[in-house]
Amino acid sequence: MDTAGRYRRFTTMEARGHSPAYERLTGAIAEDRALIALIDELPPAKRQPNLLLAAVRFLDGPIGDYAAFRDWTVTHWDAVRGTMLERRTQTNEAGRCAVLLPVLARLPGPLALIEVGASAGLCLYPDRYRYRYDGGAAFGPAGSPVVLECGTTGAVPLPARLPDVAWRAGVDLNPLDVADPEDVHWLECLVWPEQRQRLARLRDAVRIARAEPPVLVRGDLNGTVRDLVAAAPAGATPVVLHSAVIAYLPPGEREAFAATMRELGCHWISNEAPGVLPAVDRLLPPGPSSDQLLFTLALDERPLARTGPHGQSLEWLA
């Protein structure tokens, strides 16, 4: 898919219904040949809509009006380009723990959580957040400032208890430090502009992580996951998890990661878009077509549910 097509797809499949500002901007960018030509000067992995929009916001550029956005972005292209090359799309959405929780709660504890593509590690705290499914009563630690809302469909095995987490670790090519104001500002710029509730939730999750920092390792997931699994404390169940990460790997590296996970034999929770993990896709039952992007939640390559990308919905499969 060319860059213009990538921006059109983002407009219709991701931004529509979730961010009017991003829907308006990316729809216009897709038809702007001059701006697409600038974006095409970047390496393919750096042409992502989320990355461009976050970089402009990180540099205090305007996003309300397309003409102002375009003029500012072209004028400041060197700075925008530099930020896009330096930074990564590392959306660290704690809300995804709401769709991971029903799977984690069924595994024998205590758990040693290992997240690949961990960003700042905010998805390593499923036992520190509160949860509300389908507008019901919230449950979880009474003092937690984070309440994750999730709508469900189907026979979701809602947990009666939170998982017991004994250890939390993650790997990322560029781990983000919750104690670093610039890193936190970047995380905030990755939250879409109208989603104030997500922004407030991010800030609360950052406070939780600051109080109990996870072990975060800088490195490539394929070169590091074995060592992290081996480092899990004795008596704990190692669980490797990831959300919206494997899509950023070339196909060969995706298959290498899948092969490694099969060899390790520990539990593996994936929450990725269709087409990313072929072994999961082959077992996914047909479903109604949707004009919104949905992820597939799987345990050990067995699909369990379709999920909203930010953890906002959970459709359990029969």
Image (spheres, rainbow, N blue to C red):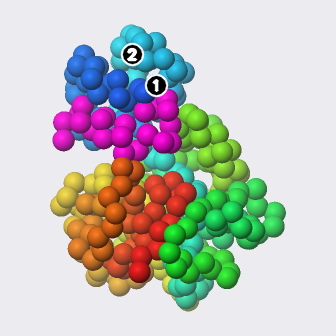
Look at mark 1 in the image and give the residue it sits on.
Answer: 56
Q: Counting other residues with Cα less than 10 Å from the Cα at mark 1, is it few (<14), some (14-19), or many (20 or more)?
A: many
Dot 1: element: helix
Percent across and percent down for residue 299 are: 40, 78
Q: Residue at x 50, y 75 (%)?
A: 154
Vertical position of residue 256 compared to residue 63: above or below: below
Q: Residue at x 55, y 88 (%)?
A: 108
In the picture, the disc for residue 70 is 2
Q: In the image, is residue 18 part of the stretch drawn in magenta?
A: yes
Dot 2 amino acid type: Arg
Q: Residue at x 70, y 50 (%)?
A: 204
Marks 1 and 2 close (CB-CB < 8 Å): no
Please name whichever residue, 317 or 236, is drawn nearer the observer in this view of the structure.
317
Percent across and percent down for residue 33 are: 23, 19
Q: Which residues are magenta?
A: 1-23
Q: Counting other residues with Cα less than 10 Å from the Cα at mark 2, is it few (<14), some (14-19), or many (20 or more)?
A: many
